[in-house]
Image (cartoon, grey):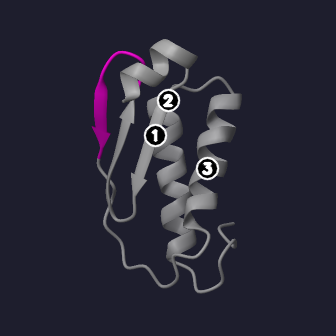
Amino acid sequence: VGGELFERYGTRLVLTRGSRSIWYHDGSSLREEAVEPRRALNPTGSGDAFTAGLTATLADGGTLRDAIREGSRLGRLNAERLMPGSVL
C-alpha cells in the first residue's frame, strides 16, 4: 500500500501502533522503527504529540526517519505524564 500511495500521490505512509514498532514507507521500501518501551501513565494525546514532532522535523528539513524518531520521542514523553500535552 505504501508504494502505491507514493507512486500515485507522492506521499509517504507512517503507521504508529501504540507501544509497538512504527511502520513506514519511505518512497522505496517498507521500514520499521523500534519504539522505546516506557511505562505510560496517560497515553491521551500521544498521537498528537507524535504528529507534532514528525511535522516539525520535516518542516525543518529533517529526514523521514529523523522525523519519526522525534515524533516517537514526543509521544513517549506525553504518555509518561499524567496531564496530556505537557511535554516541556
What amino acid is labelled 2 in the image? Leu
Q: CA distance from mark 1 to mark 3?
A: 10 Å
The quarter in which the N terminus is drawn is: top left
Crowdedness near tag 2: few (<14), some (14–19) or many (≥20) residues, C-alpha within 10 Å: some
What amino acid is labelled 3 in the image? Thr
Location of residue 12 with respect to 67 vertically, above or below? above
Tag 2's secondary structure?
helix
Asked if disc 3 and disc 2 are in contact, CB closer than 8 Å, the reply is no
From the image, state whether disc 1 or disc 3 is nearer to you. 1
The image shows residue 70 at horizontal and vertical percentages of 53, 46
Residue at horizontal 49 percent and vertical 27 percent from the top: 12
Which residues lie in the magenta part?
26-33
Tag 1's secondary structure?
strand
Q: Is residue 51 left or right of residue 7?
A: right
Location of residue 86 with respect to 28 vertically, above or below? below
Per the image, the residue denoted by label 3 is 51
Asked if disc 2 and disc 1 are in contact, CB closer than 8 Å, the reply is yes
The quarter in which the C terminus is drawn is: bottom right
How many numbered dots are placed on residues in this image?
A: 3
What amino acid is labelled 1 in the image? Val
Residue at horizontal 63 percent and vertical 59 percent from the top: 48
Would residue 30 be counted in the magenta stretch?
yes
Per the image, the residue denoted by label 1 is 14
Task: Answer with the quarter of the image where residue 38 lies.
Answer: bottom left
Say whether disc 1 or disc 3 marks the residue closer to the N-terminus: 1
Tag 3's secondary structure?
helix
Which of the numbered marks, if any, corresponds to residue 64? 2
Q: CA distance from mark 2 to mark 1?
A: 9 Å
